Amino acid sequence: MAQKLLEVGDLTKRFGGFVALENISLEVAPGDRLGLIGPNGSGKSTLVNCICGTLRNDGGTVRFDGAPVNGLRTHQRTRLGMARSFQLPRPFASMSVADNLRIPLIYTVGARAGAHLSASEVEDRCGDLLKLVGLDDKARQWPRDLTQVEMRKLELARAMAAEPKLLMADEAMAGLSPSEVADIVSLLIRLNERGVTIILIEHIMSAVMRFSQRLVVLVSGRKIADGAPQDVIQDPDVVRAYLGQ
Amino acid sequence: MRSSTFFLCAAAVAAAVFGLSRLIEYEYFFFAGYVVLQYIVLATGWNILGGYTGYVNFGSAAFFAIGAYASVAIHKTFPLPIPVLIVIGGLISGLVGLGMGYLTLRLRGAFFAIATLALAVVVQTLVTNWDFVGGSRGAYILRPASAPLVGSYIEYLFLVMLVLATIAVSTARAIERSRLGYGFATIRDDELAAEASGVPTLRLKLIATTLSGAFMGMAGAPLPYYVTYLDPASGFSLTYAVNSIAMPLVGGTTTWIGPLVGAVLLGTIQQIATVTISSAVNLLIVGLILIAFVIVAPNGLVGLVEGWLRKRVM
């Protein structure tokens, strides 16, 4: 079997007496487009936070690219090749749009072994990324001047600037119009075609179905389904969790 | 402008200031000027942590006094030249800054501010009960009869502080434009997003608390020779804590120029008020100016000017 990029084994996370995640196991192969869905409060964001080190898991392991990452801090995991975008965009408000992208270029790409970036290389990559997400004419503006959809694009671009192997997009499309959603989905598919493995966390089912090659469903901190999207959405447990019975 | 070029320019400005000040006949100018320069160093030091990373330190007086009391302790055992005392004072208070950083890593916002205030109280209690440096009685420092280079001791102190202020401001500016400065700004804006972008926030915070503490300690190191009598109440005075916060806030906290402008402005006003009105009115003036700025120009003078320039361009 081919080497997995991400292996989550029996991951458990508790907040006091509340079990947010219970024995979650999940494998993601390089190049996958995985959709992660579940009702509000089912633990999707908590799972992302545990994978990228924002939260410490209470039990279980996370292996990335063949090596365990338990105990590593978020920035170390980012340097290994994990990146995430935040559910609510969290731009660096006092910096221009271009400077927002320079941070991961300087601190992640430039900090990897043998990959020192010169100032002009940083500029070039920054320009490429802005073009990729369609923000090239906003480079010198401040995040506060961006529209909601532009802010989401900046969020994705900043995650991409770290040149990740795995991108976790946490509700990158919430609150956007259908055409904007289509915009972001095609952006994510373009990124995937460049070789980036993507986990998409999303509520908008049309987007999830268009994007995902595989679907994982979380309900109340448990994984209840994992498989081809068409099969998963017909799974009786999933239907029950979403529609009630 | 490159940092080295800037340093040369700053040094030239400092040399010009010193040259011009030599033309002034009365010594009081140096007494007052020393205090203003000392506040430039203190405010710039505070701003490396408070302005660049957004961690508000209420314990500035402790770092300042650590620098001052290190000098007292050394003076009592083996007197050394003031520049050496500044280096030692900076090292000690830098270490205390590092320690404070370690102890307060998980605290943010108001909680961090309260912890730093608590640190100041602890340090003050320790010094008050340390008999060797005079305890609560205070310590007398006998200045040497003459000073190296310039002869007059107060002119010498003024010169030393001028050099230190030049170094502090140049360092702050160099940090601001470096990789480090970018990292500090991400901590101020959003620590979680900073970590996710690969910024080692913990290490950068420790660098900031150390550098900031070191500069504030350096600002205090020559103090015993300036006042010649130092007791805990004056070394740990509220004035230092308030001024080191108020000056960057009035000037603007995101750039090196803010603390410089704030310190020159507030420092000069206070010195003038001391001789014309009364020395007790100082903090009142600072308080009123601070309130005015919080309402009218929350981003300080620098923010005010930037906003004005932006409007003119558009």
Image (cartoon, coloured by chain):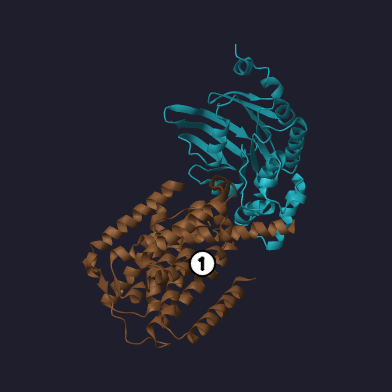
Residue B145 is situated, as x and y percent measured from the top left of the image, at 32, 87
Q: From the viewer's perspective, is A50 left or right of B101?
A: right
- Side of A93 relative to B26 (left or right): right
Instruction: Give the vertical position of A183 relative to B165 (above or below).
Output: above
Give whichever of B129, A208 is nearer the camera. Answer: B129
* Quarter that holds the C terminus of chain B: bottom right
Q: Considering the numbered disc 1 on the image, is that residue within a helix, a strand or a loop?
A: helix
- Chain (cyan): A
Above or below residue B76? Residue A163 is above
Q: In this view of the protein, can residue B21 be seen by the observer?
A: yes
Residue in the image at 63% along x and 60% along y: B305
Residue in the foreground of this view, choosing between B124 and B98: B124
Residue A206 occupies which quadrant of the picture? top right
Rendered view: B199 above or below A170: below
Could you say where residue A188 lies in the image, as x and y percent from the top left? Answer: 72, 38
Q: Residue at x 70, y 44 (%)?
A: A146
Q: Which residue is mark 1?
A: B265
Q: For this rendering, which residue is in front, A23 or A151?
A: A151
Where on the picture, by quarter, is residue B272?
A: bottom left
Q: In the rendering, what colour is chain B?
A: brown
Q: Specify the amino acid type for callout 1.
A: Leu
Quarter containing the N terminus of chain B: bottom right
Q: Residues within 10 Å of mark 1 (few under 14, many from 20)?
A: some
